Protein backbone atom coordinates (compact mmCIF):
# COMPACT_ATOMS: atom_id res chain seq x y z
CA UNK A 1 0.00 0.00 0.00
CA UNK A 2 2.77 2.34 0.80
CA UNK A 3 4.29 1.61 -2.52
CA UNK A 4 1.11 2.37 -4.41
CA UNK A 5 0.60 5.61 -2.52
CA UNK A 6 4.21 6.51 -3.18
CA UNK A 7 3.81 5.79 -6.92
CA UNK A 8 0.66 7.87 -7.05
CA UNK A 9 2.37 10.76 -5.29
CA UNK A 10 5.40 10.56 -7.56
CA UNK A 11 3.28 10.51 -10.69
CA UNK A 12 1.14 13.38 -9.37
CA UNK A 13 4.22 15.43 -8.63
CA UNK A 14 5.72 14.60 -12.00
CA UNK A 15 2.54 15.50 -13.83
CA UNK A 16 2.10 18.71 -11.86
CA UNK A 17 5.62 19.82 -12.65
CA UNK A 18 4.98 19.16 -16.35
CA UNK A 19 1.85 21.33 -16.30
CA UNK A 20 3.71 24.12 -14.52
CA UNK A 21 6.46 23.91 -17.09
CA UNK A 22 3.90 23.94 -19.87
CA UNK A 23 2.14 26.99 -18.40
CA UNK A 24 5.35 29.01 -18.12
CA UNK A 25 6.34 28.00 -21.65
CA UNK A 26 2.97 29.12 -22.99
CA UNK A 27 3.18 32.37 -21.07
CA UNK A 28 6.54 33.21 -22.59
CA UNK A 29 5.22 32.27 -26.03
CA UNK A 30 2.18 34.51 -25.51
CA UNK A 31 4.39 37.40 -24.40
CA UNK A 32 6.55 37.01 -27.50
CA UNK A 33 3.50 36.90 -29.76
CA UNK A 34 2.04 40.03 -28.11
CA UNK A 35 5.29 41.91 -28.63
CA UNK A 36 5.40 40.88 -32.29
CA UNK A 37 1.79 41.95 -32.82
CA UNK A 38 2.41 45.29 -31.11
CA UNK A 39 5.48 45.95 -33.23
CA UNK A 40 3.70 45.08 -36.48
CA UNK A 41 0.63 47.14 -35.49
CA UNK A 42 2.67 50.23 -34.68
CA UNK A 43 4.59 49.81 -37.93
CA UNK A 44 1.35 49.57 -39.93
CA UNK A 45 -0.05 52.62 -38.14
CA UNK A 46 3.06 54.64 -38.90
CA UNK A 47 2.96 53.60 -42.56
CA UNK A 48 -0.70 54.46 -42.89
CA UNK A 49 -0.13 57.81 -41.14
CA UNK A 50 2.63 58.66 -43.60
CA UNK A 51 0.37 57.78 -46.52
CA UNK A 52 -2.53 59.79 -45.12
CA UNK A 53 -0.28 62.77 -44.43
CA UNK A 54 0.99 62.69 -47.99
CA UNK A 55 -2.55 62.46 -49.36
CA UNK A 56 -3.67 65.41 -47.23
CA UNK A 57 -0.76 67.51 -48.44
CA UNK A 58 -1.50 66.58 -52.04
CA UNK A 59 -5.17 67.52 -51.59
CA UNK A 60 -4.19 70.86 -50.03
CA UNK A 61 -1.82 71.62 -52.90
CA UNK A 62 -4.54 70.69 -55.40
CA UNK A 63 -7.05 72.99 -53.67
CA UNK A 64 -4.57 75.89 -53.69
CA UNK A 65 -3.89 75.32 -57.39
CA UNK A 66 -7.60 75.18 -58.24
CA UNK A 67 -8.39 78.30 -56.25
CA UNK A 68 -5.50 80.18 -57.84
CA UNK A 69 -6.56 79.04 -61.32
CA UNK A 70 -10.06 80.41 -60.76
CA UNK A 71 -8.65 83.64 -59.35
CA UNK A 72 -6.25 83.94 -62.29
CA UNK A 73 -9.00 83.53 -64.85
CA UNK A 74 -11.17 86.09 -63.09
CA UNK A 75 -8.41 88.71 -62.86
CA UNK A 76 -7.23 88.15 -66.43
CA UNK A 77 -10.79 88.45 -67.74
CA UNK A 78 -11.38 91.64 -65.76
CA UNK A 79 -8.15 93.23 -66.95
CA UNK A 80 -8.98 92.27 -70.54
CA UNK A 81 -12.51 93.72 -70.28
CA UNK A 82 -11.26 96.98 -68.80
CA UNK A 83 -8.65 97.20 -71.57
CA UNK A 84 -11.30 96.66 -74.26
CA UNK A 85 -13.54 99.30 -72.70
CA UNK A 86 -10.60 101.71 -72.57
CA UNK A 87 -9.85 101.17 -76.27
CA UNK A 88 -13.45 101.98 -77.19
CA UNK A 89 -13.42 105.09 -75.00
CA UNK A 90 -10.13 106.27 -76.51
CA UNK A 91 -11.54 105.87 -80.02
CA UNK A 92 -14.62 107.84 -78.97
CA UNK A 93 -12.40 110.57 -77.53
CA UNK A 94 -10.54 110.77 -80.85
CA UNK A 95 -13.83 111.13 -82.77
CA UNK A 96 -15.02 113.88 -80.43
CA UNK A 97 -11.66 115.63 -80.67
CA UNK A 98 -11.88 115.50 -84.47
CA UNK A 99 -15.28 117.20 -84.26
CA UNK A 100 -13.80 119.95 -82.10
CA UNK A 101 -15.02 118.86 -78.66
CA UNK A 102 -13.20 119.43 -75.38
CA UNK A 103 -11.74 116.18 -74.10
CA UNK A 104 -9.01 117.25 -71.66
CA UNK A 105 -10.87 115.95 -68.57
CA UNK A 106 -11.76 112.69 -70.31
CA UNK A 107 -8.17 112.16 -71.44
CA UNK A 108 -6.98 112.77 -67.89
CA UNK A 109 -9.40 110.14 -66.55
CA UNK A 110 -8.36 107.67 -69.25
CA UNK A 111 -4.69 108.13 -68.33
CA UNK A 112 -5.62 107.55 -64.68
CA UNK A 113 -7.44 104.35 -65.67
CA UNK A 114 -4.41 103.21 -67.71
CA UNK A 115 -2.20 103.77 -64.67
CA UNK A 116 -4.52 101.72 -62.43
CA UNK A 117 -4.73 98.89 -64.95
CA UNK A 118 -0.94 98.77 -65.29
CA UNK A 119 -0.63 98.70 -61.48
CA UNK A 120 -3.21 95.90 -61.36
CA UNK A 121 -1.16 93.93 -63.91
CA UNK A 122 1.99 94.49 -61.86
CA UNK A 123 0.24 93.36 -58.66
CA UNK A 124 -1.15 90.36 -60.55
CA UNK A 125 2.34 89.31 -61.64
CA UNK A 126 3.53 89.69 -58.04
CA UNK A 127 0.64 87.49 -56.90
CA UNK A 128 1.61 84.84 -59.45
CA UNK A 129 5.15 84.71 -58.07
CA UNK A 130 3.88 84.50 -54.47
CA UNK A 131 1.52 81.64 -55.27
CA UNK A 132 4.17 79.86 -57.33
CA UNK A 133 6.43 80.05 -54.30
CA UNK A 134 3.68 78.63 -52.11
CA UNK A 135 2.91 75.67 -54.33
CA UNK A 136 6.56 74.84 -54.94
CA UNK A 137 7.48 75.11 -51.26
CA UNK A 138 7.75 71.90 -49.33
CA UNK A 139 4.49 71.64 -47.39
CA UNK A 140 6.06 69.20 -44.94
CA UNK A 141 8.12 71.99 -43.41
CA UNK A 142 5.32 74.55 -43.27
CA UNK A 143 3.62 75.06 -39.96
CA UNK A 144 0.18 76.43 -39.21
CA UNK A 145 1.55 79.90 -38.52
CA UNK A 146 3.52 79.84 -41.78
CA UNK A 147 0.38 78.82 -43.64
CA UNK A 148 -1.60 81.64 -42.07
CA UNK A 149 1.13 84.16 -42.92
CA UNK A 150 1.18 82.94 -46.51
CA UNK A 151 -2.61 83.16 -46.72
CA UNK A 152 -2.56 86.75 -45.48
CA UNK A 153 0.12 87.61 -48.05
CA UNK A 154 -2.02 86.22 -50.86
CA UNK A 155 -5.09 88.00 -49.51
CA UNK A 156 -3.29 91.35 -49.39
CA UNK A 157 -2.06 90.90 -52.97
CA UNK A 158 -5.56 90.07 -54.23
CA UNK A 159 -7.02 93.03 -52.37
CA UNK A 160 -4.47 95.31 -54.04
CA UNK A 161 -5.38 93.98 -57.49
CA UNK A 162 -9.08 94.42 -56.80
CA UNK A 163 -8.52 97.97 -55.53
CA UNK A 164 -6.69 98.99 -58.71
CA UNK A 165 -9.30 97.38 -60.94
CA UNK A 166 -12.10 99.17 -59.09
CA UNK A 167 -10.30 102.50 -59.41
CA UNK A 168 -9.74 101.94 -63.12
CA UNK A 169 -13.40 101.06 -63.57
CA UNK A 170 -14.52 104.19 -61.69
CA UNK A 171 -12.26 106.35 -63.84
CA UNK A 172 -13.69 104.81 -67.01
CA UNK A 173 -17.24 105.34 -65.76
CA UNK A 174 -16.50 109.00 -65.09
CA UNK A 175 -14.98 109.28 -68.56
CA UNK A 176 -18.12 107.89 -70.14
CA UNK A 177 -20.19 110.36 -68.15
CA UNK A 178 -18.06 113.25 -69.38
CA UNK A 179 -18.22 112.10 -72.98
CA UNK A 180 -21.99 111.70 -73.07
CA UNK A 181 -22.58 115.42 -73.00
CA UNK A 182 -19.77 116.23 -75.41
CA UNK A 183 -20.53 113.52 -77.98
CA UNK A 184 -23.73 115.19 -79.15
CA UNK A 185 -21.87 117.96 -81.00
CA UNK A 186 -23.94 119.72 -83.58
CA UNK A 187 -23.48 123.05 -85.23
CA UNK A 188 -25.73 125.46 -83.38
CA UNK A 189 -27.78 127.40 -85.86
CA UNK A 190 -31.21 128.85 -85.51
CA UNK A 191 -32.12 128.59 -89.17
CA UNK A 192 -32.21 125.69 -91.50
CA UNK A 193 -29.38 125.34 -93.88
CA UNK A 194 -30.31 125.10 -97.54
Image (cartoon, grey):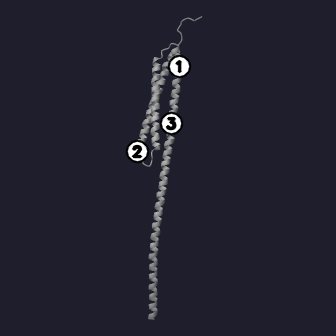
Mark 3 → mark 2, Cα distance in angstroms: 23 Å
Q: Nearer the viewer, residue 162 or 117?
A: 117
Residue located at (45% from left, 24% from top):
112
Mark 2 → mark 1, Cα distance in angstroms: 50 Å
Residue 17 vertical position relative to residue 119 in the rendered view, above or below = below
Answer few, some or many: residues within 10 Å of disc 3's Cα (few below 14, many 20 plus, some between 14 and 19).
some
Name the element at disc 2: helix
Q: Which mark is residue 117?
A: none
Residue located at (47% from left, 58% from top):
45
Return the x and y of residue 164 as percentages of the image width and height. Answer: 45, 30
Name the element at disc 3: helix
Q: Earlier in the sequence, mark 3 or mark 2?
A: 3
How many numbered discs sit on the rendered protein? 3
Q: Which mark is residue 146?
A: 2
Residue 12 vertical position relative to residue 145 in the rendered view, above or below = below
Residue located at (45% from left, 26% from top):
115
Return the x and y of residue 113 as percentages of the image width and height. Answer: 46, 25
Where is the N terminus found, in terms of image quarters?
Answer: bottom left
Residue 48 vertical position relative to residue 81 in the rendered view, above or below = below
Q: Quadrant of residue 193?
A: top right
Mark 3 → mark 1, Cα distance in angstroms: 30 Å
Where is the C terminus found, in terms of image quarters?
Answer: top right
What residue is pinned by disc 3? 72
Q: Are marks 2 and 1 in contact (CB under 8 Å)?
A: no
What residue is pinned by disc 1? 92
Q: Nearer the viewer, residue 138 or 89?
A: 138
Looking at the image, the residue that sits furthest to the bottom is 1
Q: Earlier in the sequence, mark 3 or mark 1?
A: 3
Q: Nearer the viewer, residue 64 or 180?
A: 64
Name the element at disc 1: helix
Q: Are marks 3 and 2 in contact (CB under 8 Å)?
A: no
Residue located at (46% from left, 38% from top):
129
Amino acid sequence: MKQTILKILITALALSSVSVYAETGIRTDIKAIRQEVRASTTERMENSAEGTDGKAKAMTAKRVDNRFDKMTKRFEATIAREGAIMIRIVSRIEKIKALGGKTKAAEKLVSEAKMHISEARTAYEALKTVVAGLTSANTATTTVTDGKAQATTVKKATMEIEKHLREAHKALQKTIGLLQGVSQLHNATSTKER
